[in-house]
């Protein structure tokens, strides 16, 4: 049993092994029941479409049982704390808790108390490790390497996706740049080569344009024209041309059409957005196995075996 709380938890070799396993799963028609008899609990205290459903689908693909905890109809509404909720659910014997929560660091805190593996599905502005893994898989499939130039565009200071992705790409010697409006890019960020407000400066020679949604739910002050403010950095059929022709467009979703990305590029040929969603299931299959300590089975190498082989 192992927790996956942030990208720092994973070595470069472990990431390679997870991606290799995920890509192998993508090539299969039927999956082995490596999680048969295991119980996975999904507890999403913040909204989610793709992350929650893909974790559930990943667990079911490998033969696990899935229970979904729904905060909005739970005793949280009667004033129970999130920690007491988790301690209560822990007594019902799960093998893995997949959790999304608004408070930075809460999954790591809960991991100290529960008897099962904890997988962080996004905590506040902190980390979203499985998003970074599925993004890496999508880049690796397309380019055959992660030694890429990647420009992350939009609301970066509030983005757990940007943090996890930068952390992962740094392990693979990629060059990461950050572009956003004033107040929405950090002053400095470890391992980032350029922080700018200019799309021209950041995109002219990139391989990946990675757009982000404004995290309105995390803004401390309210802005009357926030969407217009972000439209100056919109990725659309004009601005995407700043990037070389080979560059692809990515976005973790959900996107706000015609705010950070326009209708005419969102599902264009250069867009990998739906492929990211597809890859999310395979990456999460590999991550659930990693968390629950699944080892060898026919035809698919385990994380441990892959490591030993390198
Ligand atoms: C992201 C998240 O929740 O951090 N979404 C996702 O998991 N695909 C990004 C976002 O909400 O903007």
Image (tube, rainbow, N blue to C red):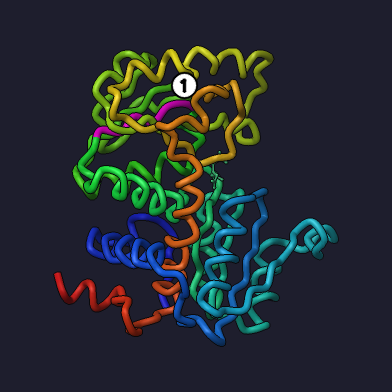
* Figure quadrant of the N terminus: bottom left
* Secondary structure character of the magenta stretch overall: strand
Q: Secondary structure at mark 1?
A: loop
Q: Is residue 100 left or right of residue 150?
A: right
Q: Residue at x 53, y 52 (%)?
A: 122
Image coordinates of residue 179 in percent, x first then y, are 39, 23
Image coordinates of residue 255 in percent, x first then y, are 58, 33
In this rendering, the answer to whether 263 lies above or below 117 is above
Q: Residue at x 31, y 44 (%)?
A: 142
Find the magenta span and give its range. Answer: 149-154
Residue found at the far left of this picture = 310
Q: Residue at x 53, y 85 (%)?
A: 36
Image coordinates of residue 90 in percent, x first then y, are 63, 77
Number of residues whose C-alpha sits closer than 10 Å to that of mark 1, classed few (under 14), some (14–19) or many (20 or more):
many
Q: Is residue 81 left or right of residue 107?
A: right
Q: Residue at x 21, y 72 (%)?
A: 307
Residue found at the far right of this picture = 78
Residue marked by disc 1? 235
Mark 1 near ligand 1 (CB under 8 Å)?
A: no
Q: Is residue 136 left or right of residue 66?
A: left
Residue found at the far front of this picture = 29
In this rendering, the answer to whether 83 lies above or below 204 is below
Q: Quadrant of ligand 1?
A: top right
Image coordinates of residue 43 in percent, x first then y, are 65, 63
Name which quarter of the figure residue 42 lies in: bottom right
């Amino acid at each position: 049993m192992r927790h996956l709380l942030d990208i720092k938890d994973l070595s470069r070799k472990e990431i390679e092994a997870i991606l290799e396993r995920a890509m192998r799963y993508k090539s299969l028609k039927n999956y082995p029941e490596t999680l048969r008899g295991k119980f996975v609990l999904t507890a999403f205290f913040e909204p989610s479409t793709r992350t929650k459903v893909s974790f559930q689908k990943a667990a079911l693909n490998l033969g696990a049982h899935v229970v979904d905890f729904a905060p909005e109809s739970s005793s949280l509404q009667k004033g129970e704390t999130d920690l007491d909720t988790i301690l209560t659910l822990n007594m019902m014997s799960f093998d893995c808790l997949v959790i999304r929560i608004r408070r930075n660091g809460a999954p790591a805190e809960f991991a100290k108390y529960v008897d099962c593996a904890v997988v962080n599905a996004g905590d506040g502005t902190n980390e979203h490790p499985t998003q970074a893994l599925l993004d890496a898989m999508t880049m690796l499939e397309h380019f055959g390497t992660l030694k890429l130039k990647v420009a992350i565009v939009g609301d970066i200071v509030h983005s757990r996706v940007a943090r996890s992705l930068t952390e992962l790409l740094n392990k693979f010697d990629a060059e990461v740049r950050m572009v956003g409006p004033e107040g929405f890019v950090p002053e400095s960020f470890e391992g980032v080569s350029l922080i700018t407000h200019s799309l021209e400066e950041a995109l002219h020679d990139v391989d990946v344009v990675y757009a982000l949604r404004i995290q309105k739910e995390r803004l401390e002050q309210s802005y009357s024209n926030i969407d217009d403010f972000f439209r100056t950095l919109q990725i659309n059929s004009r601005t995407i041309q700043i990037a070389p022709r080979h560059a692809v467009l990515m976005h973790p979703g959900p996107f706000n059409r015609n705010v950070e990305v326009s209708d005419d590029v969102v599902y264009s040929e250069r867009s990998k957005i739906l492929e990211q969603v597809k890859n999310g299931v395979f990456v999460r299959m590999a991550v659930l196995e990693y968390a629950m300590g699944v080892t060898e089975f026919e035809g698919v190498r385990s994380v441990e075996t892959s490591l030993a082989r390198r």
